[in-house]
Image (tube, rainbow, N blue to C red):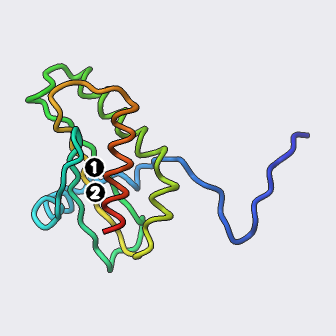
Amino acid sequence: MGTFTEHSAEEPPISYRFPKEERLRSKKLIEQLFREGSSFNSYPLRFVALHVPEASEPPVQVLVSVSKRNFKKAVDRNRLKRQIKEAYRLSKPTITQLNTQGGTWYIGVLYIGKEKNPFNTIHKKLNSGLERLFTK
């Protein structure tokens, strides 16, 4: 038998998953996000965010987008989207600590750069953008 790490009863284990429920897919909500949300840039990323206090589950929903105008090849767009999603997934514990307001945050992460950046740059900029979003 293997050994398991024990977790306290009050604190659930940290989840690094990015399930379907946490992805922003509703056309109506996406339109509302871009119509009513506030935005700022952390080059090469642009953040559009909307906080809805009455919504409860899940606490954050994320949309990731890369422009076809800047990256003609689907391979390049998909790679950048995968890198952004992975950076978000690794930042989830930080987000849950910073999100103390309750309700649901709808966040759009748009890649506005014209060139492909390495994962480290994307991860750093995503972290700084999310920190700015949740601390203002």
- Mark 1 closeness class: few <14, some 14–19, many ≥20 residues within 10 Å: some
**Residue under the point 13% across and 22% down:** 72
Alpha-carbon span between mark 2 and mark 1: 6 Å
Which residue matches tag 1?
Answer: 63
* Rendered location of residue 95, percent (x, y): 45, 58
Q: Is residue 112 left or right of residue 79?
A: left
Q: Is residue 130 left or right of residue 91?
A: left
For residue 32, above or below residue 75:
below
Residue 121 image-quadrant placement: top left
- Give the mark nearest the N terminus, 2 or 1: 1
Q: Is residue 94 left or right of residue 42?
A: right
* Rendered location of residue 91, percent (x, y): 46, 49
* Rendered location of residue 80, percent (x, y): 29, 30
Q: Helix, strand, or loop for circle 1?
A: strand
Q: Is residue 69 left or right of residue 2?
A: left
Q: Amino acid at mark 2?
A: Ile
**Residue under the point 18% across and 55% down:** 40
Do the residues under discs 2 and 1 have CB atoms within 8 angstroms? yes
For residue 6, above or below residue 80:
below
Which residue matches tag 2?
Answer: 107
- Mark 2 closeness class: few <14, some 14–19, many ≥20 residues within 10 Å: many
Q: Residue furthest right?
A: 1
**Residue under the point 23% across and 42% down:** 45
